[in-house]
Amino acid sequence: MDEHGRAAETPHFTAEYDPESAPHPRRMDRRRFLAATGLAAAGAAWAVTGLGGTARAATALGARRNAALAAGSYAVPLDSVPHTRTWMAWPDSTAIYGRKLSGMQANIALIADTIAKYEPVYLLANSASVATARRMCTNTNVTVIGSIPVDDCWLRDSGPIFRTNGTGGLDAVGLNFNGWGNKQTHAKDALVAQRVAAYLGVNFTAAGLVGEGGAIEADGAGTLMATRSSIINSNRNPGMSQTQIEQAMCAAYGASEVIWFTGIVGQDITDDHVDATSRFLAPGAGLVQTPNPADPPDIWSNDENQQYQTLSGANDAQGARIAVTALESPDYNLIRATSVDFVDSYANYYVCNGAVISAQFGDSTADANARAVLQRTFPGRTIVQLNIDNLGNQGGGIHCVTQPQPAP
C-alpha cells in the first residue's frame, strides 16, 4: 500500500517484486533544488508560521472541539485525544508478501508492542495465525482477536472510523473499503469496520462514499483535508461530483469544510493518501512533510510542495488561517532502504496516550531533526522512533497500520 512511493508499481501485493534491486535517485545540490522547487520562498513562510503558531493554535483545541460538539452530534476527533485502545491487524498472506512476510510481521509486532507500553492494543488475526501473532507480540497489553478475519494489515484504511459526541457517546462509521479501487483482494477487509463495531457493541453507519481512513485527515473541529486523486476517482466513487463527495465526507466525519490537495493518480496503490504528507495537529494547525534539499525534484516532492503551499493558504471551518509546521524528509541517499518505492514518511506517525510513535530511516541528521520537531510539536509526550523499514518497503508506515479508539 504505497503511501509515498517513487514508482507506479505496487510492491506490497506483488510477491516477486524485489525493492532492494532499485537504484537511488541522483543528488541535487541545495541551491539548485531550492531554485527548482521554489522552496526558498517557502522557507520564509515557515519562519513566520512555524512551531510558535502551532502551539498557539493547539491551546484552542478543547474550546473549539466542545463548541463544535455542543449539539451532541458525532464527529471524528484528532488522533491525539485520549484513547481507550489502538486497533491493528496481523498480516499472514504469502500471496501478497511472499518472502517479505516475516519482515512485515516483525514490524507489526514491534509497533504493537511499542504502543502497548502506553495503551492497550487489540490485534485482529485470522484464526490460523493467532498463535503466531501471540508469540511474536510479547507485550501482555496486546490482545489478539481471532474472530474477525482480515486480508491484510492496513487497518487505518479498512477499520472503523470512531466518532464521539462530547457527552460520553461513541459510534463508528465505515468507508466502504474496496481495496484501494479494487487493486487488491479485500473480501474480509471490506467487513472489518462493521465487525469491529459489532464486537464492541457500538452503532455502525456506512458512509455515503468509498474511501480509506488514511485518505482523510480530520482536525476534530469541522475541517478535513484530502487529496482529490485518492477520493474523487472513478476507482472509488464513479459518477459522484466533488460536491457530492464533500457532503458525504462531512456527514461521515461530522465536519463542514474540506481542504483539497491535487494529489497524484495511479503512481501508488493509494493514489496518494494524505496521511503520508499532511496531518492536522490541532484546529488551526497542521504539519506537512517537505522535500529534502539533497534529493532531486520529482512528482512526489512537487506534491509535498503543493500540499505545503495549499495548507499554508487555507482557512479552517472557523475561518482561521492554518499555521503550518514543516517536517523535512530524510535524504534518500542516506537512508538504509535502497528501493525507489520506499516510504520515507516521518509524517505518518501515530499519536497514542503519552507518546508519539514515528519512524527513523538511518539518515541520522534528518532522524534527529524529525525527533526534535515532533518533540516541540507534542510537548509532554515521549517520542519513540522505530526502524520499520520492512513496512516502508511495502508501501506504508505506522499511521497506516493503526486505528485509534477514542475515549468517549
Image (cartoon, rainbow, N blue to C red):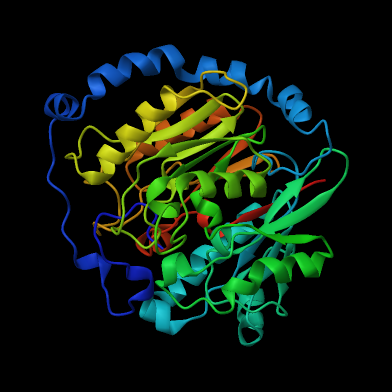
- Above or below for 294 versus 53: below
Residue name at image x 51 percent, y 32 percent: 374
Total residue callouts? 0
Task: From the viewer's perspective, tell me whether residue 201 is left or right of residue 372.
Answer: right
* Most distant residue in the right direction: 167
Report whether residue 203 is seen: yes
* Most distant residue in the bottom direction: 128
- Above or below for 257 versus 170: above
- Above or below for 199 versus 115: below
Residue 146, position as x, y percentages in the image: 70, 79
Report whether residue 290 is seen: no
- Name the image quarter holding residue 38: top left
Residue 380, position as x, y percentages in the image: 66, 29
Task: From the viewer's perspective, tell me whether residue 166 is left or right of residue 211.
Answer: right
Task: From the viewer's perspective, tell me whether residue 236 is left or right of residue 129.
Answer: left
Q: In which quadrant is the N terminus drawn?
A: bottom left
Q: Nearer the viewer, residue 378 or 315?
A: 315
Residue name at image x 58 percent, y 19 percent: 319
Q: Nearer the viewer, residue 198 or 222?
A: 222
Residue name at image x 42 percent, y 22 percent: 313
- Above or below for 111 versus 184: above
Q: Nearer the viewer, residue 14 or 111?
A: 14
Residue 111, position as x, y percentages in the image: 57, 58
Residue 157, position as x, y percentages in the image: 54, 60
